[in-house]
Amino acid sequence: MDTIASVASKVATPLMKHLTYVLLYSTYVNDLESEIQRLQHEEKEVRHTVEAAKRSGEEIEDTVLDWFGRVRAAVEEGQVFLRGEERERVGCLDVYSRYTKSQRAKNLVDLVREMRRETFVRVSYRRALRCNVSPAAREYVELESRTVMIKGIMQAWEDVKCDIVGLYGMAGVGKTALVKELAWQVEKNGLFDAVVMATVSSTPDVGMIRAEIADGLGLKFDELTELGRASRLRQRIRQEERILVILDDVWGKLELTQIGVPFGEDQRGCKCKLLVTSRDLNVLNTYIGVDKVYRVEVLSEDESWGLFEKRGGDAIKDPSVQPVAEKVAKNCGGLPLLIVTVVEALKNQDLYAWKDALEQVTTYELEGCFYSPVRSAIEKSYEHLENQELKTFFLLLGSMGISCTTRDLLVFGWCLGLHNHVDTLADGRNRLYKLIDNLRVACLLLDEGQRDSLVVLDVVRHVAAYISSRVKPFFTVHRNKELKVWPRMDLLRTCHHIFLDWCYIRELPEVLECPKLKILQLNIQGNSLKVPDDFFVQMKELKVLSLGGLNCNPSLPPSLALLTNLQALYLCKCVLEDISIVGKLTGLEILNLEKSELRELPAVIGGLSNLRLLDLTDCSPLEVIPRNVILSLTSLEELYMGNSNVQEEVKEGKGQSNDSSLSELRNLHQLTTLNVQTEDTSVFPRDFLGFGRLENYKILIGDGWKWSEVESGNYQTSRLLKLNSGPDASILMDYGIRMLMNKAEELYLAELKGVREVLYELNDEGFSRLKHLNILNCAEMESIIGSTEWAYHDHAFPNLESLTLHNLSNMERICSDPIPAQAFTKLQVIKVKGCDRMEFLFSHTMVKHLSGLVEVEISECKFMMIIIAEQRQKDADAGQTDKIRLTNLRSLTLECLPSLVSLSPESSIEATDSSNICPSQLFNDKVELPNLETLKLYSINIQKIWNHQLSYFENLSSLTVDGCQRLTYLFSYSMARKLIKLEHLLISSCKSMEQILVSDENLGNHHHLQFRKSAPTELVPIFPNLETFVISHMDNLKSIWPNQLTEKSFYKLKRMEITSCNNILNVFPSHVLDKLQSLESLNIWNCMALEAVYEIDGIITGTEQGDSNQGRLDIPLRNLSLGNLPNLKHLWNKDPQGNIRLQNLFTVKAAKCPNLKHVFPLSLAKDLLHLQFLEISDCGVEEIIENEQRGVEASLGLVFPRLVSIKFLNLPELRCFCSGNHNFRFPLLNKLYAVECPVMETFSHGILRASILRKIYLTQEDDQCYLEGDLNTTIRKIFDREADIANSLLHLHQFNDVRSCLIPLKILDDFHKDKWYGS
């Protein structure tokens, strides 16, 4: 029974379950209806919460969004079930249907109930702000200089030690736009997970800065204190794996810890990078402590126009507006802020608005709408300069105009008392350089890299002048301008400074009433004006007076003596006779007579006891300085006497001895600067200890030196000595000369007698300060550093940067081994010429010291066989490598070295196979030059330059090979593919060269070496960055291009020049044309065998495939020049038939091409939309445009919209421009020359329009011109009249004795001009 009950139970339970589905069908259906309604109500409530969160800018959780999706699906499924149940409710369901539907209803009820039971901790969250605005939406314009900087900053962050990057630049240069673009890029590229940015400003609000960063991270502060919020922000930043914090527009000290940004060691503990922008480099270095810094410069002219054009869009494409727009862009000074302000204001404006804008921009209307934001920004930079001295200096720069020099600024600052606690001119000069540096780091001066270079952006200078005019009124007329009318008297009375810098002035007022004037600069073009006697009566406060270009004969104006406060007097380029009145200016500290015509310096000058600076440079007429004048100037600190003859002798009264004025230098104990030149070594003071006090000097002693402008303004070194001892060898032993040599930074030595080595014999302290050494014409010199042992041997030439050796006929080597430890370690440039006994330049030991070598130039050394000598055996035995790697060498020039075999002895590669005869090869594997950029080879007797196994020329950008007669080719394909950075290539006078490139497989035809098979050529482009390609005097060259070229080969080639290559039949084979997509200029001259320029056989384009527009080959050529090509028959070997276009062609010139019958096929002429200049001379051309083309309509209309000048010169076979019945229009043609074109009967046969043409010139000198009716009519009349003249002259031959019928040439000329060619 139990068994039966158990079986019954097991059967009954599932049976009852299934039976329940049948019995409870209606219940399940009703439950489903009610559950769906409840779920819909709950879904609506959750959706209300979601919508409220969205309105608050919050992001919805993914679980909520997933729940909405599942709810929607479940409700739709339940409603579909219920609708089906209602349709099937009519009638009775069978048991099985009732069972299955009930089961489905029950499952849906369970699903809906499960969804209703789901709950959410939260439905939304606040997402961190992202830099998700695209460049297009931000109107960012990509510029090359900015792109390069962005890449540089990204690369800097790859260095784990670089945590803080600084970016600085002047106001309006685009720093903020740059960092926003950088933020967008690094977030888009995934370089950082989070990027936050805050603007600091000149009045930083720490709470606001913190809030901006917190917003970017989605952080809300619950803390009440500033310290708590800073800690919370710091904690939040550390939670990001990679985060970039940008602090824009920082003006001063910023407490990053107070804000909550990790900094220093705190910052290095997390993966946070900082980018800080400022207008002042000092802020970044001093207050932020950046690891790397970048300066944002103003845009170039091309980039300025690019930005202007892209922001202006279609508004500046109007032909009438574009020329004005280009001028406006050019005058915006490269400032993006000004460019954008101007172009946005002028969009959709008429031409008159553009012209008005140009006037405002060029005249710097600082209060106008264009300059207002820039002016305000620069004024703000001025207000934040660190002290009043710097502000005053900046305003002085603005008032001086565009011609300010550091020398003038030194004098002006000194006399105005600008510098505090400055006692000497040398101290004042140091302070001046510091002020200049401060303005550069504040980005109010452009950084040109030179200490004395003062470059102020025009808009900055005008803003400085704008501010200065309100503080200290001034008046300025710029160089080469004309002062037509003097300012009003009320302005002159308030002026503090007047700068008239080498301008044109018609007259000077009798009295210049300027009671407040401190500086007067009156430099006038020409020497005609004289200063009125009372000119200076009303300017008694004057401290600086500069007179230039004035005629001051017979004497200076007497009112000059009234200037008792005068401290500086310039009399430059003046005609002077008597300047005795200067002696009354007892307070004078600076007297400059540079380039003035003065024969004698008056004795009263010796009474100027306060004089600190005397400048007699280029006073070539000056012959006499009275005795004791120089000696009496005991306060003199700086004396300039370059290119003056006064130092030779001082002539006194009869019976008195002559003595050198230079001997009086002994009494000048304050002298620190001396410029002097003497050709006579005997008058130069000997054993003068005062030379040791000199801090700056330019001293030229002996014959052969010229005091040029370059030397006068040479600020690269402060201590220059040029010494030609001549026959006076004793001067080399003088103690004073030795002191000058010891302190010199730049030293020239010539014609030294008895000197065999420089170091030991001329300086026993090793020339520790010397930067540049030049040795010329020293026949006995054998070396720079000899074998002599001495005490300071290890300190020889530690700072030498350049070494020049010229014409040292006995020089064998630069230095002997062993090399001093510090010798030549900073050498960058070495130039050797005419040193015939040198067999090598560097010993193997010496070259190890030359890690900083940048440039090497060797020429005319007859017996030099190698550049770097072989390693010493004892070094090889010691296990030292013989490999040499000159990583900094950028330029190598080898010229006229007839014995040169190689850069270094035989390489290890070539030495392995001694059985083969190896041609001389310049480069091998023993010396690597991985960063060589420029290589120039002239008249070198090598057979090979390199082989394709060498891989260290990838940075070569310029290659010149000239006169290398034994070269049979220049590159193998493998080598050419490695020169990816080559930009300039010149090949000339290599008589044995038949090919420029040879395939690797054919190398065996040129030498006996065997090479590994290279990768397929077609995979790698050849010369993808080449821009200039010049080939000249290559008589045996037959092929320029390789047989196959891959995509991007010669892709950037812009200029090509081929001259005197007499075996070339065509220049461009068909497989080359589609690769030269950047070629703009082509010059071909003196190629005697050339028959066609372009070979187009095999070109298949869209027109041959039935598509008239797609697939046409556009050749970008702009300038074409052809000359002396006697066999040239066609530019194209066949008619392109519309497959090729020259839409960019700008200039075409052809000369001395007697077999050239036409210039353009008709199919090409139709697209010459940019042609402006056409000149054909001394050619056999019959028509310019060839009419032979099949399938063309009877009449075509051709327009040359930009052609302005046509010259037909000496074309004896020219019949017309085009013989076809086509219509031509030349809307801009204004010059047409038809000189010596005797068979030209008409210009063209169709309708011809040249609406602005007014003259046809009949001579190249423009002295005969003619126009009667339209162009065709005029040409016809010229032809007819020329024919009449010819017939008249022919009629003369009917006389029996023609020789007796002489017609004066003048009659023919008059007949020719007056009758036929009246203008």
Image (spheres, rainbow, N blue to C red):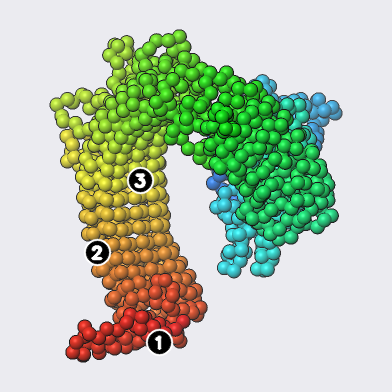
Q: Residue furthest left?
A: 915
The residue under the point 44% across, 33% down is 703
Check contact, mark 1 vs mark 3: CB within 8 A: no
- Crowd band around label 3 with a 10 angstrom C-alpha radius: few (<14), some (14–19), many (20+): many
Q: Which residue is mark 3?
A: 985
Q: Which mark is residue 852?
A: none
Q: CA distance from mark 1 to mark 3?
A: 56 Å
Q: CA distance from mark 2 to mark 1?
A: 38 Å
Toward the viewer: 972 or 194?
972
Toward the viewer: 68 or 869?
869
Q: Which residue is mark 2?
A: 1126
Q: CA distance from mark 2 to mark 3?
A: 27 Å
| Vertical placement of residue 1004 versus 694, above or below | below
The residue under the point 27% across, 37% down is 940
Q: Which residue is mark 1?
A: 1315
Q: Residue type at mark 3: give it.
A: Leu
Question: In which quadrant of the rendered view does residue 790 lie?
Answer: top left
Q: Earlier in the sequence, mark 2 or mark 1?
A: 2
Q: Earlier in the sequence, mark 2 or mark 3?
A: 3
Q: Residue type at mark 1: give it.
A: Lys
Kind of element beneath mark 3: strand
